[in-house]
Image: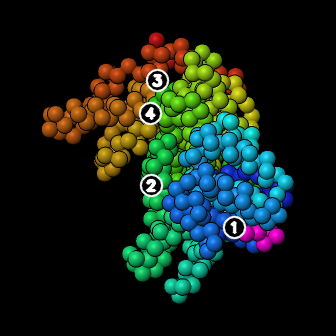
Amino acid sequence: MSFSQDFELLLRARYPLLYIPSREEERLEGVLQHIAETYNNRAVYVWDFVEGYQGNPNDGGTAKRNPLQALEFIEKLPHTAAALIILRDFHRFLEDISISRKLRNLARLLKSQPKNLILLAPEVAIPADLSDVITVVEFPLPSSSDIRAELERLCQGLGQPLSPQSLDEVVRACQGLTLERIRRVLGRAIASHGSLYPEDVDLILEEKRQILRQTQILDFYPATESIADLGGLDNLKDWLMRRGGAFSERARQYGLPHPRGLLLVGIQGTGKSLTAKVIAHHWHLPLLRLDVGRLFAGLVGESESRTRQMLQIAEALAPCILWIDEIDKAFAGMDGRGDAGTSSRVFGTFITWLAEKQSPVFVVATANNIKSLPPEMLRKGRFDEIFFVGLPHQEERRAIFEVHISRVRPHTLNQYDLERLAYETIDFSGAEIEQCLIEAMHLAFSQDRDFTTEDLLQAASEIVPLARTAREDVHLLQEWAAAGKARLASRAASMSPPRS
């Protein structure tokens, strides 16, 4: 059901007090004005604190700087007169006892009249004593058809239409932005080079980064790593390659649902976080990183509000990748936390959204400790697949050495004995192999020469891998994966216990 249909249903049902959270005041008021004209030709009254009531010559300036008088004005309207009364930024006055009492009185009165009081605000802020009389109505961001119509209008005015493919790319990039932000960023592009080009998608993505900076909950993470930067993990790579086009319109026409997400469980440093970046780059989707710690705020109820805001932003910026690193630490030991159940409520909100979401938000969650994950997280339907990312076997270690050395010595790669390096680094993770390279480079640099295979072997001999210092945790993860609880990310994953 569209916003207009939902709103008209509430008007027919005579819901007296409606609360619409939106930062698109101008577009929202235009939609409400259209609904008022088409539904019984209702009169529209608009009030704000600075100007009072506007539009009607007889009422212009009434109740200026007086929110209580703005409510009293409604009682003076003829009993049978159909009207929409729009109050801007009225959420700031709801804590006042006189305002709260007056609104509850109006809620009784307006049930028998063809009038609806509409509170406009940038966010939801409703006191508990008004929660039963106020109905919240969600006003969605511009749809793809709205954005397309705006772009076509703009291109027509410029006399330089975009190709269908370029238009589709710009429309998809604009999804998640308000119409005002879209006009602003496109105006910037036109001011820069006099027209619109497919390359202006970068400007649009920068505007999305600005939104995320303002929320301070999600980070827009640059994803430059390609699938070639991921050494080993062939099963996982094959799975990702098969789903590369699953966000396209062609996939929807075929009947495929949007991919839901991945849970990557494994030992630290084995490439789980790198995989999230590779997915975003390979699928050409923005990567949003969630710092779960930022969700937990000090005020009661604010953590739940931040969680809902985070999910709304992710859905608004879809299609996208939502990367949740070390999710096991975020929700570990919820039952024992002395936070009045905040963690459980935040987790409940997130897990419900994960199971029911219809938007193309692909969630990539990583975890190191399977014991800390709530059982609900591992249920089928939350993620498309759960992969176990174990320690790299010898062939994978060779590939990882090749990836890292080729970055810094692409022209002399053949001078390094990759087979020997892979053989001598049993139990090493990808991160520890990278650290070997860094240590070897430091050693050679201090002696004013290039690093060699022997330098790499010496660096490896001085590193004690995590798989040996945390043998019990590694055993537990390997036993869990061997029991068939997850798919193996590697075709021949090393499940042998670490050396003592």
260 vs 26, left or right, is right
The residue lying toward the viewer, choosing from 51 and 143, is 51
Residue 51 highlighted magenta (yes or no) = no
Q: Residue at x 53, y 64 (%)?
A: 51
| Badge 3 amino acid | Asp
- Residue position for label 3: 427
> Of helix, strand and loop, which one carries label 3?
loop
**Mark 2–mark 1 CB contact (< 8 Å):** no
| Badge 1 amino acid | Val
Look at discs 3 and 2 and give the one toward the viewer: 2
**Mark 3–mark 2 CB contact (< 8 Å):** no
252 vs 191, left or right, is right
Q: Which mark is residue 35?
A: none
Tell which circle, 3 or 2, labels the residue nearer the N-terminal end. Answer: 2
Residue range corresponding to the magenta coloring: 38-44
Q: Is residue 359 above or below residue 85?
A: above
- Residue position for label 1: 44
| Badge 4 amino acid | Gly
- Report how far apart the C-alphas of labels 4 and 3 lie in the structure: 10 Å
Q: Residue at x 73, y 62 (%)?
A: 77
- Residue position for label 4: 430
- Report how far apart the C-alphas of labels 1 and 3 lie in the structure: 71 Å
Write down the quadrant of residue 239 in the picture.
top right
Look at discs 4 and 1 and give the one toward the viewer: 1
- Residue position for label 2: 210
Image quadrant containing the N terminus: bottom right
